[in-house]
Amino acid sequence: FAFGGQDVIISDELSKEFEPEKHIQFIKKYSEDKSSYEYYMTEYLRMSGLYWGLTTLELLDKKDLLSEIEVMEFIRNCINDNGGISPSIDHDPHILYTLSAVQVACILNREYELPTEKIVNYIKGLQQPNGGFFGDKWGELDTRFSFCAVACLALLGKLDSIDLQKALEFVMSCHNFDGGFGSRPDSESHAGLTYCCVGFLSVTGNLHLINADILGYWLCERQLLSGGLNGRPEKLPDVCYSWWVFASLHMIGREHWINHDALKKFILACQDTETGGFSDRPGNMADPFHTLFGIAALSLMNHNGIKLINPCFCMPQHTISRLNLTPQILP
Ligand code: FPP
Ligand code: ZN
């Protein structure tokens, strides 16, 4: 493939069929090969890796390839006394990995095994006077953590345990004139953080506060000639933004504002048909993160052989339905 300005060109030989079996093998091998360089280098985010892998397998109806008993044992070993959950044993707890662990337990129908009250107290303790959330005790604060907080609490059925009004005020203070959202007040719009803020508004039923046409326009401008989506103006397309942008468009009911066939073609071109898995762009190395978001975006387009995903929680819709959660979607 060739770069065409800030885009890639999807030539005919890059056009690919969906290869679910290869992706299943990719995730299985990744989780089994515990002595590999990649496995070693990703220990600091293992809990999220587990969420990406398990969700991918469940979307392809193969979650039984991971041992439920071992997964729940791993989660138990990552729960700290303060209720926060770590990415891996003996690492520090963080709200990102706390959400991943809760997502995994819910997908396995085993959320009742979690110490709900301790986890809720940990999240409560991260909320700040401005309504935003720290990611952990070190004090980084951005809108990603606002989403993690409400998604996690909603999954545990405890959304009312924080100051929701303050939390909402913080998220709305990160809303920009172009319709998008940034990480903190006055930060530029970024599609990943826009997903977090739209997700926050969806979980808490506040989507009516934004102008969906203005945001929808900013989001659909993320589609490039290759069909792929970028995260900000002038950036290259990336498969994970197929999720951050397209899922946001779904939540605000504007998913038909981009070209689905072109997006599908771009995503399918990012498959590694030898190793399995998806990479960020055609020809790069596949990883479990881009594999989930590629397959999740295909699920939003009702691709054959992929279970339906929920655009707000990025979890199988049947799990969200079982938990009786109905994140808001605009008509
Ligand atoms: C881009 O990151 C993506 C984001 C900032 C969004 C991350 C979202 C969460 C952590 C919420 C949890 C998500 C789910 C699906 C449950 P990047 O660092 O790759 O940004 P860059 O492309 O600008 O480098
Ligand atoms: Zn990416």
Image: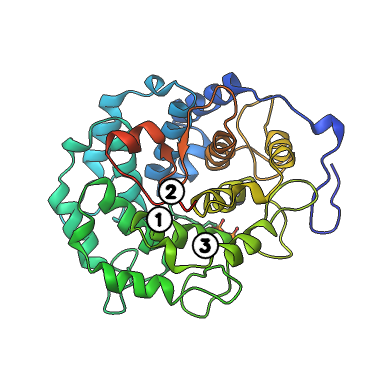
Query: In what element is the residue under mark 2?
Result: loop
Give the mark, 2 or 3, whose residue is nearer the N terminus.
3
Residue nearer the viewer, 174 or 90: 174
Confirm whether residue 33 shows in the render.
no
Query: In what element is the residue under mark 3?
Result: helix
Q: Percent from the top left, x then y, of residue 194?
A: 52, 62
Q: Percent from the top left, x then y, of residue 257?
A: 66, 51
Q: What whole-number distance in Å separates the C-alpha atoms at marks 2 and 1?
A: 7 Å
Query: In what element is the residue under mark 1?
Result: helix
> In the visual, does 290 lie left or right of 35?
right
Q: Select label 3 or label 1 by which is in front.
A: 1
Residue nearer the viewer, 107 or 100: 107
Q: Are marks 2 and 1 in contact (CB under 8 Å)?
A: yes
Quarter the N terminus occupies: top right
Label 3 neighbour load within 10 Å: few <14, some 14-19, many 20+: many
The residue drawn where x is 16% and y is 59% is: 121
The residue drawn where x is 24% and y is 60% is: 123
* Dot 2 amino acid type: Cys
Q: Which residue is mark 1?
A: 202
> In the visual, does 144 lie left or right of 112?
right
* Dot 3 amino acid type: Thr
The residue drawn where x is 31% and y is 70% is: 167
Give the mark, 2 or 1, whose residue is nearer the N terminus.
1
Q: What whole-number distance in Å separates the C-alpha atoms at marks 2 and 3?
A: 12 Å
Q: Which residue is mark 2?
A: 312
Q: Which residue is mark 3?
A: 194
Confirm whether residue 203 shows in the render.
yes
> In the visual, does 242 lie left or right of 329?
right
Give the mark, 3 or 1, whose residue is nearer the N terminus.
3
Mark 1: C-beta under 8 Å from nearest atom of ligand 1? no
